[in-house]
Amino acid sequence: MAEPLLKEETGIYKKKYPYYIENPVVENRVAQFLEAFAAVLNYTDYKPLLDSYCITNTKCNRCAVACPVYVTTQDSRDIPCYKTNLLLEIYKRYFTFGGWFRSRFLTKSFELTEEIIDEMLDLFYRCTACRRCTNECPLGVDHGLITRLGRYILSLIGIVPKALQVSVREQLEGKTHNTSQVPKNALLNTLEFLAEEIEETLGIKVEFPCDKVNREYVFFCAVSDYLLEPDTLMGNAAVLYAAGDWDKWTIGSCNYDGINYGLFYSDWHLENIIKQLVDEVERLNGKNILIGECGHASRSAHDFVPVFGGKKTYPVMNFMEYTLDCLRKGKIKLNPDIITQKVTYHDPCNIARSGWIVNQPREILKSFVKNFVEMEPNGQYNYCCGGGGGLVSIDEIHEFRMEVGGYVKAKQIEQTGAEIIVSPCANCKKQLRELVEYYNLPCKVVGLHDLILEAIEIPGGKTSEERKKMKEEMEIM
Ligand code: SF4
Ligand code: SF4
């Protein structure tokens, strides 16, 4: 694996990235930032949290060693606490009595400047909001949350990377209501294509359910999966079919995108994207929300449908939970002789550390993958892929994501010697594939259901052994 370039030689670690930003505020930024901060404090309940962090944050720097960015750069600006303190200092100075008092009666007191605003843009988007540092903080300071809040206030004065802004705008105001602008007819064509592929691969005839009412599950995945991850989707479909639940699910044609970039920078967008998702479930009179392989889509729906979803709330389930339930009940069978390669698992931060999914995918994997190895550390102590917090969609920081954000992860992957990395998340898969290519790692990145697609036994269809043989013959040709 290529060693990362040294910071003194390249300055890469200290580099401030030129984000593409649409119509940012350019004049009176300090006054406008403070106005936006005041509005957020007025209309949300962040104030008690900030008051408590102002008291508890001891600046002991224990969090530093947990952060993959700081571990890679050794730059004090990347210490989690340093970033958090930028916002806390502003809060203390402008929104507390003590800060007001000091500014009146002491000659030296903190002042917000244009440079600090630039510094916040840089540092809040060097943090992937992975929350690994929170594991280390004895006082529970949540830097991921402060990163979000900092990004939120900046976004209110137009300072937000264009990639994130365009995604949420398309979802809320665009014609297609999804981040990849996939129109309904393209969705329907894709579903037809997937049905044909399933017939050819699995030997069964299915029609993907769209806009069916009164179903048990309404399915949302990252919409990009319809363009980029056919094997993950066919794996999902294979489980539903094999479990005898084909008539229990549907996709909605008005909203089929589980992505919610509001989780990364804006409470307002987070709330409205959740409402849009719930509207679709209501329209179809579905009973449960079933989220495909996507970390932040699962977390945002799981945590915020109960908050913003209105009076009638809906249970939210990640697809891996559904699959595990089928496996435990004996509704599906996975052949343990199909996947012979060495396999490892990458925990998406949003469902492992910030969620509830650590053991479920491992139980599934270990039931049919004989050569499974863990990355160290893993589970709730995993390292972020380096593309978390929306960074993966920001092309202009590709160099940062490879050299800094994802460097520790690349090392971890290399140390496992795995040939296959399983990651049940659209964002992680994109970042991990870029890392694998960048560092020339001899492995491939897939979703969990991509492997299930190979090993599952389909009632009335081709057996997993037959499919394996077919695949080998195709590879020889
Ligand atoms: S470990 Fe906690 S208290 Fe210590 S510096 Fe980090 S955030 Fe502050
Ligand atoms: S949330 Fe993750 S990237 Fe951000 S400071 Fe903490 S450990 Fe570092």
Image (cartoon, rainbow, N blue to C red):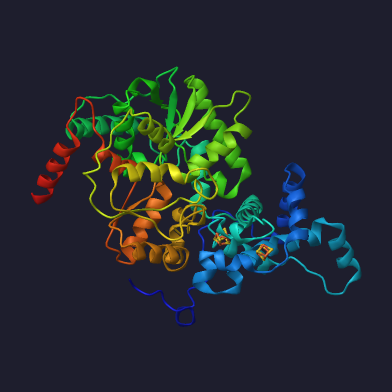
Identify the residue at image location x=44%, y=26%. Answer: 217
Q: Residue furthest top?
A: 214
Q: Confirm whether residue 17 shows in the render.
A: no
Q: Confirm whether residue 264 shows in the render.
A: yes
> Which of the 4 quarters of the picture holds residue 189?
top left
Relative placement, left or right, of 43 versus 210 is right
Where is residue 70? Give x, y as percent.
Answer: 54, 69
Question: In terms of image quarters, where does ligand 2 lie?
Answer: bottom right
Q: Residue furthest left?
A: 477
Relative placement, left or right, of 266 versus 52 is left
Where is residue 99? Give x, y as percent.
Answer: 84, 62
Q: Residue furthest right?
A: 105
Up-down relation of residue 415 to residue 288 (above or below):
below
Identify the residue at image location x=52%, y=22%. Answer: 282
The answer to which of 207 and 314 lies nearer the viewer is: 314
The answer to which of 31 and 345 lies nearer the viewer is: 345
